[in-house]
Amino acid sequence: MSGAQAGTGVSPADPYRIGHYVGFRQGTAGHAARELASKRVIVGYGFWIFLLSDIVMFSTFFASFGVLSGQTAGGPSGKDLFNLTNVAIETACLLFSSFTCGIASIGARTHDNLMYYGGMAVTFVFGASFLYFEMHEFVDLILQGAGPERSAFLSAFFTVVGCHGLHVTLGLMWLLTMVAQVFSKGYRPDILRRVLCFSLFWHTLDIIWVALFTIVYLMGAGQ
Amino acid sequence: MSHADQPERLHETDISPGDDRPDRSEIAHGLIGYAVGLALAVLLSIVSFFVAGTNLVWQPSIPIALFVLAVAQIGVHLVFFVHITTGPDNTNNVMALAFGVLIVFLVIAGSLWIMSQLNANMALPMNQLMQMQP
């Protein structure tokens, strides 16, 4: 297929030529015109870059945890402290919240109030339950005398798990903001792009939790 | 909604494909995608928790098994929840992800390697440490 055809040919299956990057075309005025992807794709890409930078930040916490996980300074190790039932409940909360967040994002695209508000409400409940169980665990550890000041291992543990919990807290605030914005402004394209970014953020928190329960809890409890 | 009113809406708000409202089959498709992702993720999580506590497998293999299961689950999340695909409109996302994975690998593997090396050197007897210095 020649370049000229690639620029002008429109197939019925792909009328908007999405994803068919055609490079620079000679416009009638003689200067090059570039075909841009849709704003939704560009916003998603930009936010994905931010999320990857967030993941890189978490990788530094994981690296310090990996280095310090054995440095218990005579204090309790993960095997003595971790309650895997609690961790399993937290994991279930986040997994189901990811699913309901997906339902909410379908509801946003279809302008379906029940799916959007219902999905967001259930996501909030699961996220808040996750935070409750995590706070419960933190308070329990501190009352046992296994707070972040006890050993390098516990400092690293509270840093990496607490940073994830902080992200979940911010995510819950963002969730409420998106519910309020859709409620007051409706399903406008710019609002829907924010909902898309929120759902990407929430799914990424779940991805970080997968790495977290595997490396910190499951491997830590086995040591 | 029918296809007939699309050009008008496009003209009004300049909505690109993917921004327009999906029809029933697309909704069902999306729901099935999330349900399959959830089922796979739950299954992999359960296997992870089971493997971590079991005595049925050779113990030194457990961390490797947990690592493989976690990578598989992260893959499931990326495909079914974040919708990273191999499609042409996703090339930039995949390239960014590959670069992110490279940086994460360098940071974690590099830190563990260097720190374990330093630890091993610290464990040497003092006279050997003195010999190593110029």
Image (tube, coloured by chain):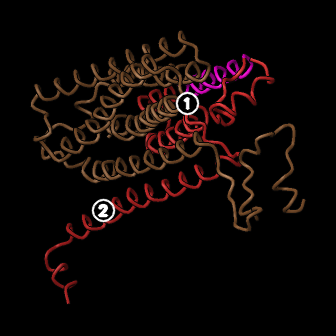
Q: Residue at x 32, y 66 (%)?
A: B114
Q: Colour of chain B?
A: red
**Horizontally, is B43 left or right of B89 in the view?**
left
B87 is higher (above) or lower (below) than B33: below
In terms of secondary structure, where does tag 1 sit? helix
Secondary structure that dominates the magenta span: helix
Task: Using the rendered view, name the quadrant where residue B54 is placed.
Answer: top left
**Residue found farthest to the top:** A114
Closer to the camera, B133 or A55? A55
- What is the x, y in percent for residue A26? 76, 65
Is B34 part of what is drawn in magenta?
yes
Stretch in magenta? B24-43
- What is the x, y in percent for residue A111? 58, 17
Q: Amino acid at mark 2?
A: Ser
Residue A189 is marked as: 1
Chain of the residue where label 1 is placed in the rendered structure: A
Q: Residues within 10 Å of mark 2 (few under 14, many from 20)?
A: few
Q: Is the N terminus of chain B in the top left, top right, bottom left or bottom right quadrant?
A: top right
In terms of secondary structure, where does tag 2 sit? helix
Kindly identify which residue carries mark 2: B116
Q: Residue at x 21, y 71 (%)?
A: B124
- What is the x, y in percent for residue A190? 51, 33
